[in-house]
Amino acid sequence: MGGIIDVGAGTVTARLKGFSRYALMADNRTFADLWGHWAQREVEVLVSRHVVQGANEREFQPDRSITRAELTKLLVEMLTRDPEGAVTLVSPATATFSDVTPGAWYYQHVETAARLGLVKGTGGLFRPGDPVTREEMAAMFVRALGLENQVAAAALETLPYADAGDIGGWAKGYVTLARQMGLMKGENATSFGPKSQANRAQGAVVVLRAMERKGWVSKTVTVSGLLSISELEGRHFELEVSVAGKVTRYVLLPADGPEGPVARRLESAVGRQVRVTALRDNSASVYMRGPALRVLEVEVLP
């Protein structure tokens, strides 16, 4: 039986008229320079959601300074994932900034951000290739989350960093709010590093924290149990998890589709105890056997 599917900015909403088989394809990629990196999990979640992209097909370049154009694109892509919002990319014929031309890969994102009041130029210039400092990144995220009206009050509070005095007077309220919301932490236990250049990994991590705080993306969960195959309503993977005598049966959906590496790892581990890292799929499971998980990683347990 059919249904109605609405495809929005990063979301798919299905209003089903009956039971059948449905599949939502996802991109589950990683990059060689992310293996073992502190931000690997966060970046891979965003890559799977098409919020961030690699610097090229092989590299994410997590430790490279993030530019104003790159961070602006991240912010706008984040906002388009808001299911309650109405943010769409704009492409005016006349550019707002003289150094952002209509043919640039970031043109629509910069123009959208300018229209939303997230970014400002100086002397008619946007400076798209300039690196972003950590205090500038705090300001851009606070604006993106619509908290500008709280900045003045936040600026009156004391920050627990030895280098708090190095934070620009204009930026203190933004940094305070970013810290209070759990979006940004210090470079270490005693320093915030306001004038340090933010890198691509930090930008991605703050995006994911903001999206999780707003409920626009699910946090990853890790569960262990017995992996099996079910033929009920179509062949699929299931994980039987027992905690304190309570048994939960999860439907496992490979994040990279039925033919991807995750699916092959699941196939090879049927009948074994495994640990899976996954995103919760809050839509109703078409198999009606339990909550659904979109699997990112599979580990066979001894």
Image (cartoon, helix red, strand yellow):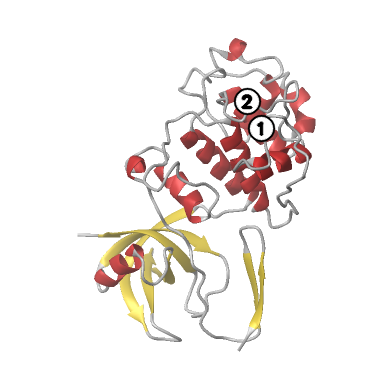
Image quarter hosting the C terminus: bottom left
Identity of the residue furthest to the bottom in this view: 1
Residue under label 1: 140
Task: Give the vertical position of 231 relative to 249 (above or below).
Answer: below
Instruction: Report crowding for label 1: few under 14, some 14 to 19, many 20 or more residues within 10 A (C-alpha).
Output: many
Image quarter hosting the N terminus: bottom right
Q: What residue is rendered at 52% in x and 70% in y?
A: 24
Tell which of 227 and 127 is nearer to you.
Answer: 127
Q: What residue is rendered at 71% in x and 32% in y?
A: 119
Residue under label 2: 136
Q: Amino acid at mark 2?
A: Glu
Instruction: Report crowding for label 2: few under 14, some 14 to 19, many 20 or more residues within 10 A (C-alpha).
Output: many
Q: Amino acid at mark 1?
A: Met
Residue 136: x and y in percent read 63, 25
Tell which of 16 and 50 is nearer to you.
Answer: 50
Q: CA distance from mark 1 to mark 2?
A: 6 Å
Quarter of image, res 3: bottom right
Do the residues bearing badges 1 and 2 touch, measured as CB atoms within 8 Å?
yes
Tell which of 122 and 34 is nearer to you.
Answer: 122
Residue 29: x and y in percent read 40, 54
Residue 75: x and y in percent read 63, 41
Tell which of 237 and 128 is nearer to you.
Answer: 128
